[in-house]
Image (tube, grey):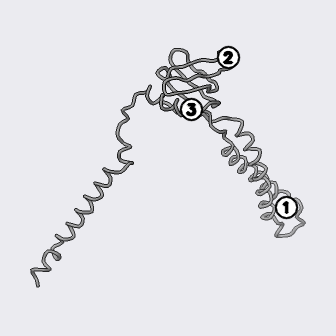
Amino acid sequence: MRAILSPYASGAHDMRRVCFAVSVMGLVTLASQRARAQEPDTTSAAQRAGFALARLGGGQLVRIHNRRVGRRQGVVVSSSADRLTLETSFWGRIEVPASDVDSLWVRGGGHAGTGALIGAVLGGVALGAGGVAVAKANCEGSVNCGEAGGFVFGLAVGGAVGAGIGALIGSAFPKWRLRAP
C-alpha cells in the first residue's frame, strides 16, 4: 500500500499537474488571436493608406496630409485602394494616389457626450449651491431649513439644463479620427 501512495505523498503527482496546466496555458496563449496581434505589422504605409481609402464612402468629410501639398480637406467623391478623389472648397476636385497619402483623418461625430457631462456637473453643482442659498435665505430661525431638498432640486434641474447646453456646445467641435497610416 505504501508503494502506491508514495508518488502522491512526495508531491510528484501535483508537479505533473502543474506542468500540464502550464503547458496547456502556453499553447493557448501562442494560438490566441490576441497573442498574434502583437506581431510586427509588415504592411507598408502605402498599403495601410490603400486599405483605409477603400473603406471610405462617398460624401464623407476627410483630411489628408502629404509631403508635397500639405493638408487638404474635402468631401469624398470616389475612393479605391489606389486613388482618392476629393471635392475641396478652395482647390476644386483633386485626385490623390494612395502612395502620396501620409495620413488620413475622417470626421466623426462631435464632442456632445463630453460637453453634456461637463455641463451636467457644472450646472448641477452651481444650481445645487444656489438651492442651498435660497433655502437658507428663506429660513426663519429653524434648525432644519431644507438645504438638502434645495440642493437636490438644484442639482437635478441644473444637471439637466447644463447637460443640454453642454451637448450643444460640444457638438459644435468635430472629432477627427486617424485612419491611416
Label 1 to label 3: alpha-carbon separation: 57 Å
> What is the three-letter code of the residue carrying label 2?
Phe
Q: Residue at x 70, y 47 (%)?
A: 116
Left or right, residue 180 beside residue 130: left
Q: Is residue 26 above or below residue 49?
A: below
- In depth, the one of 55 and 44 nearer the eye is 55
* Numbered disc in front, either 3 or 2: 3
Label 3 Cα crowd, 10 Å radius (few <14 / some 14-19 / many 20+): many
Q: Nearer the viewer, residue 67 or 152?
A: 67
- Residue 65 lies, with reference to residue 24, above or below; the image says above
Residue 25 visible, this angle? yes
Relative height, residue 135 to residue 10 (above, below): above
Which of the pair 75/77 is nearer the observer? 77
Q: Quick one: SS at disc 3?
A: loop
Q: What's the residue at 48%, 28% (across, down)? A: 50
Q: Tag 2 or tag 1, which sits nearer the N-term? A: 2
Q: Answer with mark 1 or mark 3, whichever residue precedes in sequence.
A: 3
Q: Helix or strand or loop: what does disc 1 sit on?
A: helix
Tell me residue 144's x, y (percent).
82, 69
The structure residue drawn at horizontal position 35% and vertical position 36%, both measured from the top left corner, is: 40
Labels 3 and 2: the sequence-earlier one: 3
What residue sits right under mark 3 in the picture? 56
Return the residue at label 1: 135
Residue at the spot 56% in from the left edge and 30% down from the top edge: 105
Amino acid type shown at disc 3: Leu
| Residue to which mark 2 is pinned | 90
Give me the C-alpha separation between circle 1 and circle 2.
58 Å
Residue 112 located left or right of residue 44? right
Q: Which mark is residue 6?
A: none
Residue type, label 1 = Ala
Looking at the rendered structure, the secondary structure element under dot 2 is loop
